[in-house]
Image: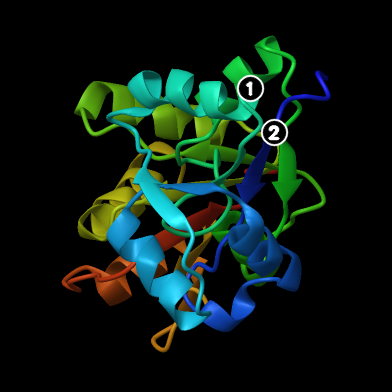
Amino acid sequence: MNESFGKLYLVATPIGNLDDITLRALNILREVDVIAAEDTRHTRKLLSRFDIHTKLISYHAHNEHHKTDTLLEYIQAGKKIALVSDAGTPAIADPGFYLVREAVKKGIEPEVIPGVSALTFSAVAAGIPVDRFAFYGFPPVKSGRRQKFFEQIGNEDKSVFIFESPHRITKALSNIVEYIGPETQVSVVREATKVHEEILRGTAEHLLTQNGDRKWKGECVIGIAPQLD
């Protein structure tokens, strides 16, 4: 790495409870020149909570290709940049991968500031085997691709975790019943670390029956146990 370069930090932030921020993350957010945030309004609430006044710029899925060159130019000029997502760890179903890849190409070694993640929280809380597991991100919306998505999960020999929008949780449970099996052991982790945190466990059919008419709210992670013979 060029010693004249600044620094790129990928900083994990709380997924709900702001007290989950690490001391190291707070120190980094205070000392960098710029914080690139998925949603500056959201991140400003976090910064205000801890009396941090670092400059904010937006960096999200719709502008990351355009903004990446600018951020890397800042770093090459000796600036320190922190990347944060709205919640959790950057690059895990959030902006970050493209910036890391392009930084590495230019000889910039990113420094990851670890912390809470909805994925690891859910893996611990799920109550299904996690000695090995896979993360599949968000399911496709279109029916054909969605069917293949869940069928592929059904062929896994390990637990799988997915993110899903609250208004499609019932549909996801129905997809699991149809394409993987009604007796599939499933967990739904909702609003992790927040006031209304909820963890549901049971077969896909049971959870679908119990919650079929429910209007889901909040961030959700679904864990799907492997179909072992």
The quadrant holding residue 102 is top right
Residue 1 sits above or below residue 193 on the image: above
Circles 2, 1 touching at the beta carbon (< 8 Å): yes
> Which tag, 2 or 1, sits closer to the chain's start?
2
The image's mark for residue 119 is none
Farthest-out residue, top: 105
Q: Position of residue 223 (x, y in %)?
A: 54, 55
- What whole-number distance in Å separates the C-alpha atoms at marks 2 and 1? 6 Å
The image's mark for residue 76 is 1
Q: Position of residue 4 (x, y in %)?
A: 77, 24
Name the residue nearer the viewer: 36 or 3: 3
Q: Amino acid at mark 1?
A: Gln
Q: Residues within 10 Å of mark 1 (few under 14, many from 20)?
A: many
> Which residue is pictured at 54% across the width and 29% down the height?
74
Q: For mark 2, give the secondary structure.
A: loop
Name the residue nearer the viewer: 158 or 90: 90
Residue 45 sits above or below residue 68 on the image: below
> Which residue is pictured at 61% across the width and 56% down the height?
12
Q: Is residue 91 left or right of residue 61?
A: right
Residue position marked by numbered label 2 in the rendering: 6
Q: Amino acid at mark 2?
A: Gly
> Which residue is pictured at 47% across the width and 40% down the height?
93
Q: Is residue 62 visible?
A: yes
Q: Quadrant of the N terminus?
A: top right
